[in-house]
Image (tube, rainbow, N blue to C red):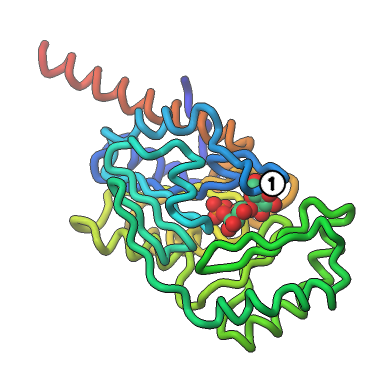
Amino acid sequence: MNSPRPRTAAGTDGLDAIRNAPAGAVLGFDFDGTLAPIVDDPAAARAHPRAAAALARLAPHVGALVIITGRPAAVAVEYGGFGDIDGLVVLGQYGLERWESGELTAPAPPPGVAEARAKLPQILAAAGAPAEVFVEDKGQALAVHTRRAAEPQVALDRLRGLMDALAERTGLVVEPGRFVLELRPPGMDKGRALRGFLDGGAGAPSAVLFAGDDLGDLAAFDAVDGLRADGVPGVKVCSGSVEVTALAERADLIVDGPEGVVDFLDGLTGAIEAAAGSAGEGEGA
Ligand SMILES: O=P(O)(O)OC[C@H]1O[C@H](O[C@H]2O[C@H](CO)[C@@H](O)[C@H](O)[C@H]2O)[C@H](O)[C@@H](O)[C@@H]1O
């Protein structure tokens, strides 16, 4: 299977670098909207049916695979069916949590989360939120979802100012996403998480890739840009949707949602395996 070509020279260099030296490359992925199709109920989200197999096939060829998600890490592992993928690391809650080989490391939530949890019902009432607006309690963070409302963007806009004020009062930050506003601890984002993950590796990667779909993934795109400025080839992949356009504007490569991401992974692995096969034939000749 042929991989789609990036539309930028930097992205083409980044993808070539991954294909040419996969063993030193680090590939990062968002979960919801990138590996898992968006659905109305966050608890019903599951990875694309071919995602876990595609990651498992790619894993032995590359330096590292890391999923960086707003979900609790253990939830992404469960909903993804990722528990058996060799070497996979999942950084949850925007990088606060780390899951690796079945072991989870997670800090205690800051006290502001409990205060926000107690005040959120009043905030929803004050914003006139319809009954379909609900809170997803992630322990470290609280996500207010409006997707199921008749007018999800209107409901989101009405909440924004009140959520900003609550974040300020509780020492949290507001993380906006696809018909969601999250209250979460400050000091971490997907860019810092990616940088921190690379810093914990065995040296600079030969190349880096990050694929995402939502506003929270822009920080990881910033990190890829920063790495490129430092001389590390990199690729920014957007899992395209009509809901968010900000990532597509910054991406080297746009694919068609999670199905496109999985096809891209299969194509990349196929190219790496084909190159390894030809090299083996050359050596034997
Ligand atoms: O960083 P991510 O892996 O993309 O997680 C971000 C948030 O995604 C989830 O919400 C989104 O997906 C839901 C299920 O498809 C959808 O119903 C919702 O509208 C989306 O915003 C998740 O529920 C959040 O906790 C994540 O932080």
Give the mark count: 1
Residue extending furthest toward the bottom: 169
Corner quadrant of residue 194: bottom left
Q: Is residue 116 left or right of residue 125?
A: left
Q: Residue at x 66, y 43 (%)?
A: 38
Corner quadrant of residue 160: bottom right
Indicate the secondary structure of the residue bearing disc 1.
loop
Residue extending furthest toward the front: 118
Pick whichever, 106 or 168, lies toward us: 106
Q: Is mark 1 within 8 Å of ligand 1?
A: yes
Evaluate whether residue 198 shows in this view. yes
Q: Which residue is mark 1?
A: 41
Question: Disc 1 marks which amino acid?
Answer: Asp
Location of residue 120 with respect to 5 vertically, above or below? below
Give coordinates of residue 173: x percent, y percent. Answer: 59, 77
Residue extending furthest toward the left: 284
Q: Residue at x 50, y 68 (%)?
A: 140
Give coordinates of residue 14: x percent, y percent. Answer: 40, 46
Evaluate whether residue 250 shows in this view. no
Pick whichever, 113 or 191, lies toward us: 113
Location of residue 70 with respect to 21 vertically, above or below? below
Pick whichever, 102 or 265, lies toward us: 102
Q: Is residue 137 left or right of residue 274?
A: right
Q: Residue at x 37, y 39 (%)?
A: 83
Pick whichever, 190 or 150, lies toward us: 150
Quadrant of the rendering where the C terminus is positioned: top left
Q: Residue at x 42, y 63 (%)?
A: 95
Location of residue 74 with respect to 174 vertically, above or below? above
Few, some or many C-alpha atoms within 10 Å of disc 1 (few <14, some 14-19, many ≥20)?
A: few
Give coordinates of residue 136: x percent, y percent. Answer: 64, 60
Give coordinates of residue 118: x percent, y percent. Answer: 66, 78
